[in-house]
Amino acid sequence: MQNLQKKQAEINNLCGFSSTLPGLGLGISAEVGELNDYLAKISNLKKPKPGDDLNNLKQKIADECADVLVYLLQVANNLEFDLEQAYLSKCHKLIERHTPAKSLN
């Protein structure tokens, strides 16, 4: 993930992208909204548009997931934390919280 954070920083510099934290938060919200729309369509909870076949919807979902990741990488870079380490820490907490306690022998 650190490589992705570095790559995103390079892209931001190359393209002149600069965002405030509130702007990044709004961007994440917008992209998650679009992702949710496509997930509803692929789950038949919302009527797809003409041309939205399964492969097309999967590609749109992949694109929206990538958009969300771009914003998350930018937040991590802006606040100077390692997103991979944050993810691994969260995984550890989830395992501790949701794994049945092992019996003491």
Image (spheres, helix red, strand yellow):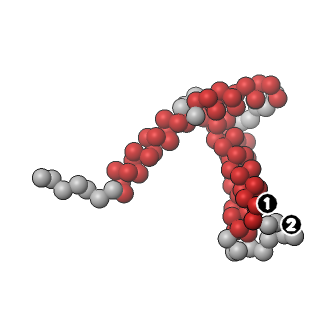
Nearest to the observer: residue 47 or residue 18: 47
In the structure shown, which secondary structural element does the residue marked by tag 2 occupy? loop
- In percent of width and height, residue 45 lies at 69, 74
Q: For the residue marked with disc 2, what is the amino acid?
A: Gly
Image quarter for residue 15? Answer: top right
Instruction: Name the residue located 46 percent from the left edge and 40 percent from the top edge.
Output: 88
| CA neighbours of label 2 inside 10 A, class few (<14), some (14 to 19), many (20+) | few
Nearest to the observer: residue 5 or residue 76: 5
| CA neighbours of label 1 inside 10 A, class few (<14), some (14 to 19), many (20+) | few
Circle 1 sits on which residue? Answer: 56
Residue 37 in sight: no
In the structure shown, which secondary structural element does the residue marked by tag 1 occupy? helix
Residue 23 in sight: yes
Instruction: Name the residue located 78 percent from the left edge and 74 percent from the top edge.
Output: 47
Name the outermost residue toward the right: 50
Name the outermost residue toward the front: 55
Image quarter for residue 56? Answer: bottom right
| In the image, residue 63 above or below residue 54 | above
Query: Which numbered circle lies on residue 51?
Result: 2
Q: Quadrant of the N terminus?
A: top right
Mark 1 in CB contact with mark 2 (< 8 angstroms): yes
